[in-house]
Amino acid sequence: MQAQVWALDQQRLMQTYRRQPVLFVRGEGAYLYDTEGNRYLDFLAGVAVCNVGHCHPHLVARVQQQAAQLMHISNLLLSEPQARLADRLCELTGMERAFFCNCGAEACETAIKIARKYANTHKSTPDYEILVLEGSFHGRTMGAVSATIQPKYQQPFVPLLPCFRALPRNDLSALREAFSERTAAIFLEPIQGESGVNPLTDEYLLEAQSLCQRYNALFMIDEVQTGMGRTGKWFAYQHLGLMPDVVTLAKGLGGGFPIGACLARGIAAEILQVGDHGSTFGGNPLACTAALATIEIIEQEQLCERAARVGNYLRQRLLELQHQDAPIQEVRGRGLLIGVQLTEPIARTVVDKAFEQRLIINPVGDWILRLAPPLVITEHEVDAAIATLQAVLREVRP
Ligand SMILES: Cc1ncc(COP(=O)(O)O)c(C=O)c1O
């Protein structure tokens, strides 16, 4: 069956992803199983999605029950799961209203539309700017790509949406210089996951927030990758006690079920009105039930605390490898979102060899490994991953 599926994949799918020719048919906790019953330790978690582990029984039960009861009704009708999820997310984030969509890019599009309508209604210049950072990633739709300051994602698709102004990451003087009455918003990831797990400094985030207050600009935080407990708190901005105007979520929100959200407070929460924005599927009862169940699991199993604890352990074990002369330049990140900068451009080879050893990790370019396991991972599983990584790094070191 595996060979047949591989052939179909190669023939019939647009080849937008680099894939391993292994067919996975089952997942449980931190493990995936292929057609032969081989078990793989998953340190990718669907790219920071399966925070509660694969097929958590509570999530499965709630989704099954809701699927049998009511899947979709349209956003023109009242929905209990949607209202309850909006309420829970507002409690958790400090925001006041939610808009639901299907993925991270759509959540970021919503934030961008809020910033643009805010500028058109509250700024006196048509020449407004939304500040974004070099190395950012906000998704693949055209608005989100325009906000994603990485040439490889932008160049094939020019011309881009105007109004974005790119700033170098963590450069305080460039940040201060960029702000003016023309600034409608700044849109930031607290840790830039897709460009290699690059955290913003505390000073940078604090300064961005205070400049937003000074210039009446919206402080917009993209928590698509860092949210839902991954960095050791529900949301990464909470480590600093920040209070954004807009927060975007997706990935871990549905525990593997597609759902995105854009949350806002104050003036930003009132910008989008009837007819301004919409989504056929966004926030349907099934997706919202999956997200509610995911939140219950994160709470009951204290997965934020666990991400902080096991994340520290993982970082410490990686630093041990570095001290034992593994080709590691730097270990970055927070909680269970970790980037390992290598001293050689061997990331893809390391990832392929690790996969042969049944450990799933992810390369960012040639120099960086990204580790984003489910938050249910144990110290014992971390030890197993480190042992594999150590062996692979020894083998491939030039
Ligand atoms: C910070 C951030 N924003 C937005 C996105 C886009 O999310 P999606 O792939 O669900 O559209 C991603 C995806 O990696 C992301 O990491």
Image (cartoon, helix red, strand yellow):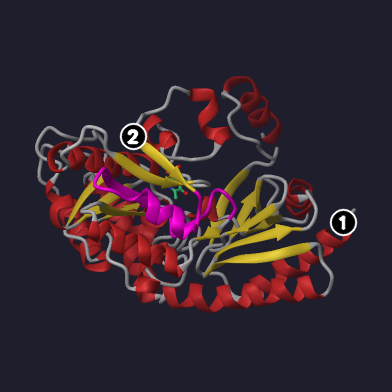
Kindly identify the residue that appears in the image at 84 percent across and 70 percent down: 325
Q: Which of the numbered marks, if any, corresponds to residue 321?
A: none
* Local SS, label 1: loop
Of callouts 1 and 2, the N-terminal one: 2
Q: Is residue 223 visible?
A: no
Residue topped by disc 2: 163
Left or right of 320 on screen, residue 280:
left
Kindly identify the residue that appears in the image at 44 percent across and 22 percent down: 159
Q: Nearer the viewer, residue 385 or 60?
A: 385
Image vertical order of residue 324 relative to residue 74, above or below: below
Left or right of 144 on screen, residue 71:
left
Q: Quadrant of the N terminus?
A: top right
Point out residue 99 in the picture as x, y percentages from the top left corner. Answer: 22, 47
The Cα–Cα distance between marks 1 and 2, rounded to whole angstroms, is 45 Å
Answer few, some or many: residues within 10 Å of disc 2's Cα (few below 14, many 20 plus, some between 14 and 19): some
Residue topped by disc 1: 397
Kindly identify the residue that appears in the image at 45 percent across and 72 percent down: 232
Tell whether position 195 is magenta.
yes
Amino acid type at mark 2: Cys
* Local SS, label 2: loop
